[in-house]
Image: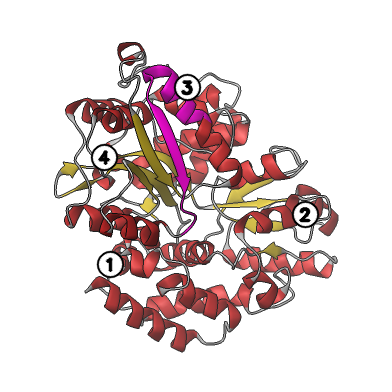
Amino acid sequence: MRRITRTLPVLLALALAAAACGGDDDSGGGGSTTQAQSLKGQSIEVYAVWSGSEQANFKQVLDGFTQQTGATVTYTSTGDNMSTVLGSKIEGGAPPDVAMLPQQGLLVQLANDGSLKKVNADVQAAVDANFAPVWKNLASVNGTLYGVYYKVANKSTVWYRPQAFQDAGISEPPSTWDDFIQDAKTLSDSGVTPVSVGGADGWTLTDWFENIYLSQAGPDKYDQLSKHEIPWTDPSVTTALQTLGQLWGDQKLIAGGSSGSLQTDFPTSVTNVFGDSPKAAMVYEGDFVSGVITDSTKAKVGTDALMFPFPAAGAQPAVVGGGDVATILKDNPASQAFLKYLASPEAAAAWAKLGGYTSANKNLDLASYPDPIAKAIGEAVVKAADNVRFDMSDLAPAAFGGTAGKGEWKDLQDFLKNPSNVQGTAAQLEKDAKAAYQ
């Protein structure tokens, strides 16, 4: 469905070189003038996973909607337990008006069980005007559009302290997995722990696996595994786990070793690298790492904090994407207007200027991004939209790919604890996948 190419790293380089240039015009569907104060007195409740700085940034987006329409918004953060929290609310007959779903598999599940409401013609027109077809397809089930991908991510970025590389004598970032491991050992020999892993949040571990698997096994196998058309005991899976074990199995290469990593959440994995007393030289995660750097450290993205594409573990670099899709559970004018607003360049710009955010909105003015790296990533995501494979765990049923303490999250945490147990991990992954995909 979406072909992986080598284009994204090239686009990143080109975009960085052209960072001083202006972006696209702020045009397209979802304009602000026609809805001014038209929904005054109405209110909606919105659920999303975001907390901390992300919640604060999203609150500014919500304020923009209120100023535009007069409708008020109540926000609730579900944390990583969106599927559990939302499921209980639906079962109890009290779902929120809108939910920002972090897994595409959850969207499919809720659409198929009748919990989601289809978007109206205005929302569809805004999506058609502002997004590439791939994002519309990902937000659709059986040809019906159910949502808007408001926040997306390039999950194939590694962030590092250039000073640590310089002190260790590393002149340029690695482009292959073998070089990555070698540079990690060089950093370790220089007295710096190479990598901080946020293993307390199981979703970060699925992203590690997916980048390696996509690069090694290729896009066709990736598609097959994401649909459970091949088992998790397939040799391509065990090969990827063995490769991942080269890093996770060497306690000198990860901050705090396996046990310490399992107690480190995602934000802390970032501050471990860029905080006042750094504990590591690198951290892997998506482009949203820049938001944590900006909000929680004194480091400056573009100088103290740089990034490079996830190193190729196989024949080609991996380009893994993800995103949060706004969906409607209570069909009313304010909910539909909110999704139309989220599909607009204006709503994208409201968060883009704050950092830690990437939009797939092709009409967003790229000058909205706060630094050259964020701008380059945003431009690359738009240009390479049809060449990105979506996060595999987000495509899976939530019981397998999107629930804390269960399924793939738990299985990979167990693997981080014991990276030598390749066959046992694959067998457990297959057992849990089989149960979830039935």
Viewer-proximal residue, 59 or 169? 59
User: Would you name the residue on which mark 2 appears?
Assistant: 165
Are circles 3 and 1 on residues that touch, CB within 8 Å?
Answer: no
Q: Write the residue at 37% across / 17% down.
A: 27
User: Would you name the residue on which mark 1 appears?
Assistant: 224
CA gap, disc 1 and disc 4: 21 Å
Q: Is residue 146 visible?
A: yes
Q: Write the residue at 35% across / 55% down.
A: 86
Dot 2: what SS? helix
CA gap, disc 2 and disc 4: 41 Å
Q: Nearer the viewer, mark 1 or mark 2?
A: 1
Dot 3: what SS? loop
User: Would you name the residue on which mark 3 appears?
Assistant: 365
CA gap, disc 3 and disc 1: 36 Å
Identity, as a three-letter code, of the amino acid under mark 2: Phe
Q: Nearer the viewer, mark 2 or mark 4?
A: 4
Identity, as a three-letter code, of the amino acid under mark 1: Gln
Q: Position of residue 171 (x, y in %)?
A: 75, 51
Q: Position of residue 191 (x, y in %)?
A: 85, 66
Are circles 2 and 4 on residues that touch, CB within 8 Å?
Answer: no
Are circles 3 and 2 on residues that touch, CB within 8 Å?
Answer: no
Dot 1: what SS? helix
Identity, as a three-letter code, of the amino acid under mark 4: Lys
Q: Write the residue at 63% across / 65% down.
A: 197
Is residue 407 found left or right of 433 in the rendered image? right
Q: Nearer the viewer, mark 3 or mark 2?
A: 3
User: Would you name the residue on which mark 4 appears?
Assistant: 136
Instruction: State which tag comes first along the sequence, 1 or 4.
Output: 4
Q: Is residue 232 visible?
A: no
Q: Position of residue 73 (x, y in %)?
A: 42, 32
Are circles 4 and 3 on residues that touch, CB within 8 Å?
Answer: no
Identity, as a three-letter code, of the amino acid under mark 3: Asp
